[in-house]
Image: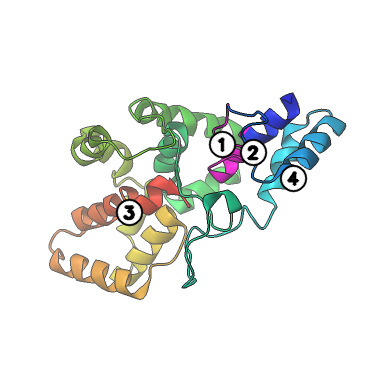
Amino acid sequence: MFARSIVNRIWAQLFGRGLVMPLDQMHSANPFSHPELLEFLAKDLIAHGYNLRRLTQGLVSTRTYARSSQWDSAAELPDASLFAVAETRPLTPRQYGLSLVVSTLSSKWLAEQFARDEWAKRIAELESRASGLAQQIELPDQNFQVSISEALLLSNSGDVEKNYLASGDDRLVGQLKKTATPAELIETAYWAVLSRAPQSDELHAAEQYLAARADRPEQAAQQVVWALLTSAEFRFNH
């Protein structure tokens, strides 16, 4: 039972819901969604000395973990217990805080840090830098919705502008200032914040926005980055 509980909770951490729900109701009257799978994983965990690294590596290597949160079929969306679609889930405060820090650093600066011998020390510094905002973010539960206080924090806090929208050489906005064209600026921002290229409609809308603010390019670049940072796509793991 102990091994099953560990497997169920790590599964829920990675997939957004457990093989048994609610997590703390693992008993005969509450059926498992995939009993054979849970039993196999529990036995494997015991056989390998409760190696959580092995368990985690195995789960994140599955096709189930790699599934998209989008359901493109015309058929009705399957029940969540089937794990046919990825569960959209919010980042934890620490994940969100560190993501904000890393995504708003210059990619060139980050590449230089990777090459240094003290990269482990640099990671600790970045995590420390993220802790301030993380302490102000609500720990998500199963019915999480972005709170008004979080929205106001990202909209009005001077610390957000100072920490994530600064234009120094080691920051994303500083890197965007040196791009040759609006299209390059937008693509660089999308890759840095959302880890993907902009779609054609997104590129067009952002180009129009930058053109309308051609007299204040740095502020326009800051607003593009801010819009991406406050998007649902950035806030949620999907």
Q: Amino acid at mark 2?
A: Pro
Residue corresponding to mark 3: 228
Say left or right for 86 vs 131.
Answer: right
Q: Mark 2 vs mark 1: which is more N-terminal?
A: 1
Q: Is residue 77 left or right of residue 148?
A: right
Q: Tell me the tag on residue 115.
A: none
> In the depicted view, which residue is nearer to us: 169 or 236?
236
Query: Is 92 drawn above or below residue 110 in the view shown?
Result: above
Q: Residues within 10 Å of mark 3 (few under 14, many from 20)?
A: some
- Residue 101 picture location, percent across and down: 41, 40
Q: In the rendered image, is residue 63 in sight? A: yes
Amino acid carrying mark 3 in the image: Leu
Dot placed on the residue nearer the N-terminal end, 2 or 3: 2
Q: Residues within 10 Å of mark 4 (few under 14, many from 20)?
A: few
Near-viewer residue (178 or 123): 123
Q: Quadrant of residue 197?
A: bottom left
Does the magenta run of residues contain 115? no
Please tell me whether mark 2 sits on a helix, a strand or a loop. Answer: loop
The local crowd at label 1, few if under 14, some if 14 to 19, many if 20 or more residues have their Cα within 10 Å, is: some
Residue named by callout 1? 21
**Distance from the alpha carbon under mark 2 to that under mark 3:** 41 Å
Q: Decide: marks 1, 3 in contact (CB < 8 A)?
A: no
Mark 1 vs mark 3, CA separation in Å: 33 Å
Front residue of this view, candidates 76 and 228? 76
Distance CA(mark 4)–CA(mark 2): 13 Å
- Picture residue at 33% right of the left edge, 58% below the top: 176
First-in-chain label (4 vs 1):
1
Which residue is denoted by mark 4 in the rendering? 37
* Magenta stretch in the rendered image: 9-24
List x then y, in percent, for residue 146: 31, 40
